[in-house]
Image: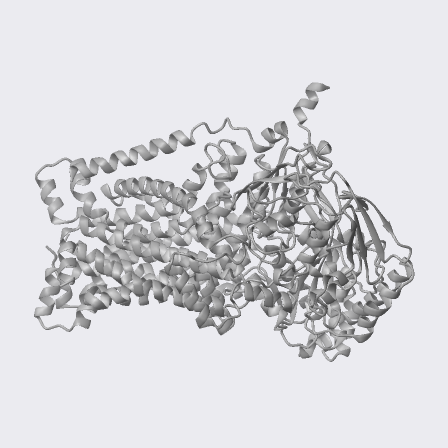
């Protein structure tokens, strides 16, 4: 059925193998290139941005794309290209870091619950249920009151909600894996539980996890806008893609470019992530290596 | 297994078919506006689900609109001029010293269940409104009445000592502590409307909050309309009250109020012909203006948008700093480019023209003087000025203004300002605990008089919240103004007080509100007034098409 | 199986208790009370209001009396909507939200599963890329953006469909159902594609193919059951979430559902309403997570065996 031998023989070859396979996947490489481009642009933004992101020109107001302002200006007369570039710094950071937080907690929680099973599983999953049910908004308001304003809180708040579904998915996956032959085999070879989780269970759950992660990153970016709305996230004149889209929706009929360009940027990121994610999933799939 | 699958499939198909059938026929529906014009139903975008329709409990504009359809007070204000007009009181006398008002009530006034409506209803209702347990936030509207404040605060226990008497069934006498020129206006505020005693007591005690007397099927009012249905979060429908004393002259058959939380949604509903009346998001105003759309109504509104400065903050203690901040806001630019709703740049707290009052202000947009003032206060070119935070409650409009001001202060004074938005209740908490530096604020007048704006900044004024306290100011407002012998003298004293306030600048006036609405052209007699009051009893609908046919 | 259900329901008791306690603490420590207002509330009014709603009692006393009421099925009076009970408000919003949730889920399942299967049949071809790209766009497109776009196009420009209300005008349920369903459809499409691909590479499918069974039979008879497991796991919380109401869609389309109550109650500090909605929502999550676990067991006999084993 499933051939576990490559991983047991040489644990590191999983990743090497994956890299080789990934390099052959044009679409994944394309996604990777776009992401890299966006990240590099964000890093270099303070030096390459055409305008200041905060300086206003109220007399100019919102103007459509032109030779001076390629992506137009917002109602304060600020250059949209610059705002999107700066917004990318926030959105990419929040998207990746917060998702990573959610990923780590979710995977650990889910795999432990699924692997250990029994009472531990029941308790852990009921905690997830509790977290699902608590009123999120009140939680956010309290976070702000107790800890003041801090960008770290943003990650805590996002991590706190996003890991839940991740944990459920991973647990389901692990439950179906742990009775499989290769895990039993690993047991009989005397591997510790932790080693089994780390070397066999987690790699085998990577497929669904990667798919879910690529779906999570954009929703995290939009969640950031909601949190900023509640006062937790970033404050003007700083901005993010999520916030730009939020503002853009309000004026989508009058100044469509304020919505379209941030929207395109976010979608582009999303597509890139998904191409890369799908590629990674195929590359990491232990079963696919047999074909 | 196969059976289960087939069962599931047929359920699925049935649901879809059901959905299609119930939802078919789209496209050929009549819009609310079209059908409303034919059967005299006004569709009104009303902001939010009302908290309560009890006139002694409710606060807020949406509640005000509905209550003003269901109930009325002793007088009305004219839809346009706000001059007092007879309401339940047919006529009234004012004593020469201006302290005793005698109201002669209509004999044909009735409650909506047919019960007679007379002067005793007012005595009882006003007694009820002054019960602390009821939690009436507008109890202060009664305080001009002799002993009302003392009774409310528990200093006297006998309501007979309060200046309200029913001389007979149809004569009500009210005695004031001081002759105040705006007393009649207060009688058109919903907090002084009468309530139907038998109904209130049927559902609980007089001073009990949260009884069900205002609900569908229970409520009895004295207004032009009566409650027909109240569907939570969906709509509130009122229909003509046949017992209303002037029922023959009420033209609308029904008014439907929609709890439209979101003004963008509301504007789209207006465009789709679902509403006769709605608000308009500020960014849409230009579009309607450019199209010369007759629905757009921009009218002055008795309200001021301002910033509070916490004068206890070390760097805001110096009035020169506060003045400098006030002088570097380019209000003309702000209202023309950001708020866009025809708002009037404000250089004083009281909106100009309030009861013939025009504040004197030496506040201007003057960056040069401002820089100088800031330098004199010890911050030449903004150096060493601590980073200051503007607090605002979460809203697009407030955000835009704060973002613009942040830049203006940076540009003209070279000081760093950060923004902080908080969710409404948190914001209220922060401001009332004075945990802020600069905070956005707004004040809408309850009645047209400078007093309504200026008594906010008394030392112990509950809405002061700036820590600013000036005994000269208090003395002017509390002692000299009430003793004024003429309207002119009274206004002069207000001017003096306001000048003092502006010189000290614990608050920075920014603009005078306008109320911007969309009113369907078929809605006639809409009225325009600075309190944004709606007179449903006078409005009527006139379908455009049928007029053309008649011509 | 019965024991499994019973033990899960037993576990629900401590879960609910923790949810109530934590929420109770959270809301009482959040700044701003239910009666704070822009206009300063005079101290005597504040006292009167607090006394009327028992807010002047010590917190533990409020907590125990609240719990006693809840055990009797009484969620108390709403603080904000004077005279209404929380039970009444939930009862008013639930049918609307449930109906909307059902339609949205139908939209999501029909579009999502068919797109997912379609894509999985020929992976890495145009037949895969196009529906999957559309799904990506669907995920990207939050309802606060999709809703207004649908309204502007189908409601205002084309004038085909009404843009607001619920059950007032024929057709007013279509746009909200699509708006709310699209995001879920996109997730379901991706999940079902993944699940199908996984199953289609399994040996028993290869065996079936080798036996020369028709592709249609293989997909609908053999593969679908296993391929939908990830979708089922997603459906539990998704459906619970839908029944909790969608604030955004309900606001955009002027729908009198639960979502508006939930969000505004938090903003209003309507303590009893927040608690009532939270308990209701927690109940939904428990029930639907249980249901989705049960369906997963039913679809996957191997897991069923484990579940039994796990209970030993």
Residue B332 or residue B380, whichever sits in front: B332
Q: Which image quadrant is residue C43 in?
A: bottom right
Image position of B127 with respect to B283: above or below: below
Q: Which image quadrant is residue B25 in?
A: top left
Direction from residue C64 to residue A184 in the image, left or right:
left
Q: Which image quadrant is residue B468 in?
A: bottom right
**Residue B198, percent from left and from top:** 62, 48
**Residue C253, percent from left and from top:** 50, 43
- Quarter of the image with the C terminus of chain B is top right
Direction from residue B245 to residue B389 in the image, left or right:
left
- Quarter of the image with the N terminus of chain B is top left
Answer whether residue A255 is visible to the viewer in this image. Answer: yes
Direction from residue C75 to residue B396 in the image, left or right:
right
Q: How many marks?
A: 0
Colour scheme shown: one colour
**Residue A30, percent from left and from top:** 35, 53
**Residue C71, percent from left and from top:** 37, 60
Residue occupying image coordinates x 46% and y 32%: C170
Residue B502 or residue B488, whichever sits in front: B488
Image position of B524 with respect to B516: above or below: above
Image position of C90 with respect to B142: above or below: above
As drawn, which residue projects farthest toward the front? B168
Residue B103 or residue B202, whichever sits in front: B202
Residue occupying image coordinates x 30% and y 48%: C190
Answer whether residue A158 is visible to the viewer in this image. Answer: no
């Amino acid at each position: 059925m499933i051939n576990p031998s490559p991983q047991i023989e040489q644990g590191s070859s999983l990743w090497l193998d994956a890299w080789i396979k990934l390099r052959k996947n044009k679409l994944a490489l394309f996604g990777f290139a776009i992401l890299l481009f966006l990240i590099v642009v964000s890093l270099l933004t303070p030096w390459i941005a055409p305008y200041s992101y905060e300086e206003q020109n109220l007399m100019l107001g919102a103007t459509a794309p032109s030779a001076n302002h390629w992506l137009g200006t917002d109602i304060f007369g600020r250059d949209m290209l610059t705002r999107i570039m700066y917004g990318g710094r926030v959105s990419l950071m929040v998207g990746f870091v917060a998702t990573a937080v959610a990923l780590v907690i979710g995977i650990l929680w889910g795999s432990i619950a699924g692997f250990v099973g029994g009472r531990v599983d029941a308790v852990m999953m009921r905690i997830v249920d509790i977290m699902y049910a608590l009123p999120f908004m009140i939680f956010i308001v309290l976070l702000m009151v107790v800890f003041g304003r801090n960008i770290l809180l943003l990650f805590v708040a996002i991590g706190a909600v996003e890991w839940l579904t991740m944990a459920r998915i991973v647990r389901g996956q692990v439950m179906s894996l742990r009775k499989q032959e290769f895990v039993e085999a690993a047991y009989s070879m005397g591997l510790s539980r932790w080693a089994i989780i780390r070397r066999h269970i987690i790699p085998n759950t990577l497929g669904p996890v990667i798919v879910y992660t690529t779906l999570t990153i954009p929703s995290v970016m939009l969640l950031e806008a909601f949190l900023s709305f509640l006062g937790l996230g970033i404050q003007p004149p700083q901005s993010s893609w999520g916030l730009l889209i939020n503002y853009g929706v309000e004026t989508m009929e009058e100044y469509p470019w304020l919505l379209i360009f941030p929207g395109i940027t976010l979608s582009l990121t999303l597509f890139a992530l998904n191409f890369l994610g799908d590629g990674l999933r195929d590359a990491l799939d232990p079963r696919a290596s047999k074909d | 297994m196969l059976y289960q699958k087939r069962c599931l499939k047929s359920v699925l198909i049935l649901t879809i078919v059901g959905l299609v059938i119930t939802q078919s026929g789209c496209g050929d529906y009549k819009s609310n506006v079209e059908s409303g014009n034919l059967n005299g139903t006004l569709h009104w975008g009303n902001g939010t689900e009302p908290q309560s329709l009890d006139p002694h409990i409710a606060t807020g504009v949406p509640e005000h609109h509905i209550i003003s359809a269901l109930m009325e007070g002793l007088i009305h204000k004219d839809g346009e001029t706000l001059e007092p007009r007879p309401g339940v009181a047919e006529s009234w006398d004012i004593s020469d010293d201006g302290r005793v008002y005698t109201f002669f009530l209509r004999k044909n006034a009735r409650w909506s269940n047919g019960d007679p409506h007379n002067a005793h209803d007012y005595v009882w209702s006003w007694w009820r409104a002054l019960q602390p347990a009821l939690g009436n936030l507008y109890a202060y509207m009664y305080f001009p009445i002799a002993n009302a404040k003392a009774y409310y605060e528990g200093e006297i226990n006998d309501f007979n000592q309060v200046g309200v008497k029913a001389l007979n069934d149809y004569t009500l006498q009210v005695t004031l502590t001081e002759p105040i020129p705006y007393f009649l206006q207060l009688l058109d505020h919903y907090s002084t409307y009468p309530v139907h005693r038998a109904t209130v007591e049927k559902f609980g005690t007089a001073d009990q909050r949260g009884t069900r007397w205002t609900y569908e099927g229970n409520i009895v009012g004295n207004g032009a309309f009566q409650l027909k249905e109240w569907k939570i979060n969906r709509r509130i429908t009122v229909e003509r009250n046949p017992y209303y004393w002037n029922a023959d002259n009420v033209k609308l058959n029904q008014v439907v109020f929609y709890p439209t939380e979101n003004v963008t949604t509301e504007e789209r509903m207006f465009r789709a012909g679902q509403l006769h009346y709605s608000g308009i998001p500020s960014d849409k105003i230009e579009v309607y203006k450019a199209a010369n759309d007759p629905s757009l109504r921009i009218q002055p509104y008795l309200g001021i948008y301002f910033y509070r400065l916490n004068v206890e903050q070390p760097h805001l203690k110096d009035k020169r700093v506060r003045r400098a901040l006030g002088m570097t806001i380019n209000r003309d630019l702000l209202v023309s480019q950001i708020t866009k709703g025809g708002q009037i740049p404000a250089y004083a707290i009281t909106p100009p023209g309030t009861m013939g009052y025009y504040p004197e202000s030496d506040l201007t947009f003057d960056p040069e003087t401002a820089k100088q003032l800031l330098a004199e206060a010890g911050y030449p070119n903004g150096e060493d000025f601590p980073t200051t935070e503007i607090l605002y409650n979460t809203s697009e409009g407030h955000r835009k203004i704060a973002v613009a001001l942040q830049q203006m202060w940076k540009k003209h004074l070279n000081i760093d300002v950060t923004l902080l938005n908080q969710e409404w209740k948190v914001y209220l908490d922060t401001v009332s605990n004075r945990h802020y530096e600069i905070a956005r604020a707004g004040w809408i007048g309850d009645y047209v008089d400078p007093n309504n704006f200026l008594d906010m900044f008394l030392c112990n004024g509950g809405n002061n919240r700036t820590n600013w306290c000036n005994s000269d100011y208090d003395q002017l407002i509390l002692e000299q103004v009430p003793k004024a012998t003429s309207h002119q003298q009274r206004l002069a004293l207000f001017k003096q007080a306001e000048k003092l306030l502006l010189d000290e600048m614990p608050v920075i006036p920014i603009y005078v509100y306008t109320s911007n609405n969309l009113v369907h052209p078929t809605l006639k007699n809409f009225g325009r007034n600075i309190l944004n009051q709606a007179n449903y009893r006078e409005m009527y609908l006139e379908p455009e098409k049928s007029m053309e046919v008649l011509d | 199986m019965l024991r499994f259900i019973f033990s899960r329901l037993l576990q629900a008791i401590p879960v609910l208790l923790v949810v109530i306690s934590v929420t109770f603490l959270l809301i009482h420590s959040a700044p701003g009370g239910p009666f704070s207002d822009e206009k300063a509330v005079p101290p005597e009014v504040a006292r009167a209001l607090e006394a009327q709603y028992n807010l002047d009692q010590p917190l533990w006393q409020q907590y125990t009396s609240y719990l006693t009421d809840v055990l009797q099925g009484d969620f108390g009076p709403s603080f904000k909507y004077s005279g209404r009970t929380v039970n009444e408000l939930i009862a008013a919003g639930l049918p609307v939200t449930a109906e909307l949730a059902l339609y949205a889920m139908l939209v999501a399942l029909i579009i999502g599963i068919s797109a997912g299967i379609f894509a999985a049949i020929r992976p890495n071809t145009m037949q895969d890329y196009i529906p999957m790209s559309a799904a990506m766009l669907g995920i990207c497109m939050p309802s606060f953006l999709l809703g207004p776009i649908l309204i502007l196009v189908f409601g205002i420009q084309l004038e085909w469909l009404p843009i607001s209300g619920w059950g007032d005008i024929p057709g007013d349920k279509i746009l909200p159902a699509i708006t709310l369903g699209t995001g879920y459809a996109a997730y379901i499409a991706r999940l079902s594609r993944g699940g199908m691909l996984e199953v289609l590479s399994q040996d028993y499918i290869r065996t079936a193919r080798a036996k020369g069974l028709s592709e249609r039979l293989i997909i609908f008879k053999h593969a679908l059951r296993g391929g939908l497991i990830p979708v089922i796991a997603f459906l539990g919380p998704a459906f619970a979430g839908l029944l909790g109401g969608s604030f955004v869609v309900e606001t955009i389309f002027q729908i009198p559902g639960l979502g508006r109550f939930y969000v505004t109650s938090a903003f209003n500090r309507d303590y009893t309403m927040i608690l009532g909605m939270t308990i209701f929502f927690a109940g939904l999550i428990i029930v639907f997570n249980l249901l989705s676990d049960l369906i997963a067991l039913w679809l996957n006999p191997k897991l069923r065996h484990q579940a039994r084993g796990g209970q030993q």
